[in-house]
Image (spheres, rainbow, N blue to C red):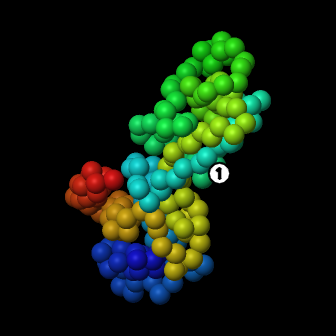
Amino acid sequence: MTLLTIAQSVGYNVGISEPPQSVFGVDGNDERQLLQFTTEAGRELERRVDWGSLRKSEVIAGTGSDSRFNLPADFSRLVEGAAVYSAGVPLRGGLSAEEWSSLTITSGTPRYFRLDGAAILIYPYPLAGVNVTVSYQSQNWTGSGTAWTSDGQVPLVPEDLIERGAVWRWKRHISAEYQDYVAEFEAALADRARFE
């Protein structure tokens, strides 16, 4: 499904008399709302579940002299479990700023990491030629980023859940009964999340 087919399906479900022939770049009120509600649903899905389609890895090459490495631009969060490892050995995370600052500056085999904004800190500094792998969830739930860019764009999260999420948002927006639609969305999301 594409943005357009998702929006058309939402349109049928919410009673739009003429579902759109285009969503992107159209100035109609229905089209703007369909774009907004499908975007909100896509962002929620990216945030709530660690989808396999959004899982990525970044390999950081050690320099022997630096512990701070920039995370990828699409970084959302670390995956559950052993998200940061070197030579197959997981690194320990969760150190506070105070604990981190108490560590003696040295290079060697990496044992600890700490997230610091858009960077990851590694201790001891990885030696030149030593790689550290960071497994993370991308925030790019569409093929080109965090938002729709065309009618033909395909999402990287389940289309049916975007549709369900947009339907309940539309119903809420028009002050119609929407709690059943939220419950259906939540049940479908829970079912799909179990298999990721």
Q: Position of residue 2 (x, y in %)?
A: 45, 77
Toward the viewer: 34 or 105? 105
Give the vertical position of 130 relative to 19 (above or below): above
Residue at image position (41%, 56%) is 52
Give the vertical position of 10 relative to 65 (above or below): below
The quadrant in which residue 162 appears is bottom left
The quadrant in which residue 118 appears is top right
Q: Position of residue 120 (x, y in %)?
A: 63, 35
Q: Position of residue 14 (x, y in %)?
A: 32, 73
State the quadrant of the N terminus. bottom left
Horizontal side of residue 196 vs 100, given as left or right: left
Residue at image position (66%, 25%) is 108
Local secondary structure at mark 1:
loop
Decide: few, some or many residues near mark 1? Use Cα within 10 Å; few <14, some 14-19, many ≥20: few
Q: Position of residue 123 (x, y in %)?
A: 63, 25
Give the vertical position of 86 relative to 38 (above or below): above
Toward the viewer: 172 or 47? 47
Residue at image position (48%, 73%) is 154
The quadrant in which residue 12 appears is bottom left
Horizontal side of residue 67 vs 34, given as left or right: right
Q: Residue furthest right?
A: 65
Residue at image position (39%, 50%) is 49
Q: Is residue 179 visible?
A: no
- Say what amino acid the circle numbered 1 marks: Ala
**What residue is pinned by disc 1?**
73
